[in-house]
């Protein structure tokens, strides 16, 4: 077992009507910037609830943060933060909006000349501008972790950042918001959370029995609620379990004391940066080939996953492991998530070579739980996704 420390300072306000209580979590003298995405919050009632809760504050609004938070747009918000003396931020949206606000939290106090260096040079943020969140799309777990991923369109880059200074001070999780989410985004959210768990679970056995059970319980819950949510997003019980599963999938708990993979995310981010494919769908594209390519290293965990999550109880370890991969692909297909790059673009040729070269240029020479996947391995895995 690995040594670890689990600290998560984010306060969670979970349940119906909790948006009304968010004002109690913000300092009374704060000058608040309210940040959101494309404006769906104005049609589903969330915006009105938030504005009512913030009525006692001096509020500056910034909308239009895109689905992959774009550096150039965030720099516009950063200019306002600095020029108007913003002291607190409130992210109202899904993981993209929250990730964007985390970048702004770091950039607002960054003393360097180029904020992109926070990502490019992997600068850990120890202290950021304080912010809270109102979650409108369960998926990324960003509402209870300190990680963020930002896209820069001009260079076709999508890079991660983080640090202990980037935990939200509080996050409001009202499952009622799920009923207004389009089916495509719900499917993305389920797929994203499911893959987050697999990235922390699908490695090799180390005797961490409880951690395995934690991970498997989240996977089982997502499998159980997925058809209910897709059929009826107003099902409050299903929505609540879906939302909490997404949060628990990436708030740091299940990764403690166990090895993590995250190679799927590293490759998937490049597909989003190059083609604009939804993040969750890039994970579904890379995952099958990644597990097949690394089958010998992962087959024990794959077989365990097949037994405990999918009820596969016959066959050899190899046979059960292969069935587990097939079941995962079937699950994604049941959500109308395609699992081949060619399903999203006709311009596949050369993609693997470009991604492999990018990893070489960045010095990413050892991905995966064993830090053994080279850019040459990445090339083969991405080719398998075509």
Image (cartoon, rainbow, N blue to C red):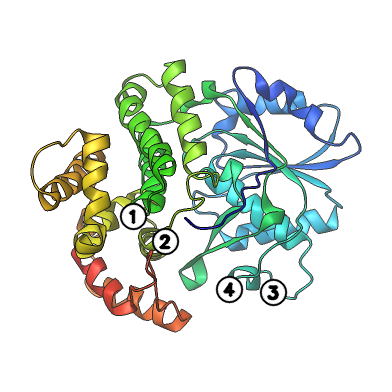
Count of numbered badges drawn on the protein: 4
Q: Quadrant of residue 116?
A: bottom right
Report how far apart the C-alphas of labels 2 and 3 lie in the structure: 22 Å
Quick check: 93 left or right of 197? right
Q: Which residue is mark 4?
A: 120
| Residue 93 coordinates in the image, percent (x, y) | 58, 38
Whether residues under marks 1 and 3 lie with C-beta atoms below 8 angstroms apart, the answer is no
Depth-wise, is mark 2 or mark 3 nearer the camera? 2
Report how far apart the C-alphas of labels 1 and 3 lie in the structure: 29 Å
Q: Which residue is mark 3?
A: 114
Which one is in front, 365 or 23?
Answer: 365
Residue 40 in view (yes/no): yes
Q: Earlier in the sequence, mark 4 or mark 1?
A: 4
User: Tag 3, which secondary structure?
Assistant: loop
User: Tag 4, which secondary structure?
Assistant: helix
Q: Which residue is mark 1?
A: 282
Residue at 68%, 40% in the rendered image = 10
Q: Which residue is mark 2?
A: 269
Which one is in front, 164 or 49?
Answer: 164
Whether residues under marks 4 and 2 lie with C-beta atoms below 8 angstroms apart, the answer is no
Disc 1 crowd, CA 10 A, few/some/many (<14, 14-19, 20+)? many
| Residue 344 coordinates in the image, percent (x, y) | 26, 54
Whether residues under marks 1 and 2 lie with C-beta atoms below 8 angstroms apart, the answer is yes
Q: Quadrant of residue 263?
A: bottom left
């Amino acid at each position: 077992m690995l040594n670890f420390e689990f600290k998560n300072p984010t306060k969670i306000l979970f349940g119906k009507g909790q948006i009304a209580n968010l004002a109690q979590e913000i300092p009374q003298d704060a000058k608040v910037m309210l940040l959101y995405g494309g404006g769906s919050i104005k049609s589903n009632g969330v915006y009105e609830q938030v504005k009512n809760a913030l009525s006692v504050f001096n509020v500056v609004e910034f909308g239009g943060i895109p689905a992959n938070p774009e550096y150039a747009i965030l720099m516009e918000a950063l200019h306002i933060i600095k020029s108007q003396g913003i002291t607190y931020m409130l992210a109202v949206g899904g993981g993209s909006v929250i990730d964007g606000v985390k970048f702004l939290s770091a950039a607002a106090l960054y003393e360097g000349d180029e904020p992109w260096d926070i990502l490019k040079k992997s600068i850990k943020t120890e202290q950021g501008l304080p912010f809270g969140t109102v979650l409108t799309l369960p998926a990324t777990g960003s509402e209870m972790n300190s990680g963020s991923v930002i896209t820069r369109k001009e260079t076709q880059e999508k890079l991660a950042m983080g640090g202990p200074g980037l935990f939200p001070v509080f996050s409001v999780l009202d499952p009622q918001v799920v009923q207004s989410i389009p089916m495509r985004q719900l499917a993305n959210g389920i797929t994203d959370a499911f893959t987050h768990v697999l990235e922390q679970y699908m490695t090799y056995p180390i005797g961490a029995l409880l951690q395995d059970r934690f991970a498997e319980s989240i996977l089982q819950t997502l499998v159980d609620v997925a058809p209910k949510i897709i059929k009826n997003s107003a099902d409050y019980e299903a929505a609540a379990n879906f939302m909490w599963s997404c949060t628990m999938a990436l708030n740091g708990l299940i990764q403690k004391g166990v090895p993590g993979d995250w190679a799927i995310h590293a490759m998937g981010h490049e597909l989003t940066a190059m083609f604009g494919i939804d993040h969750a769908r890039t994970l579904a594209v890379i995952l099958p080939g990644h597990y097949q390519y690394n089958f010998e290293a992962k087959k024990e965990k794959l077989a365990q996953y097949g037994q405990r999550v999918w009820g596969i109880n016959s066959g050899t370890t190899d046979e059960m492991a292969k069935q587990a991969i097939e079941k995962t692909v079937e699950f994604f297909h049941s959500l109308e998530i395609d699992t081949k790059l060619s399903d999203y673009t006709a311009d596949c040729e050369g993609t693997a070579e470009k991604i492999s070269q990018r990893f070489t240029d960045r010095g990413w020479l050892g991905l995966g739980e064993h830090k053994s996947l080279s850019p040459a391995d990445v090339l083969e895995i991405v080719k398998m996704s075509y």
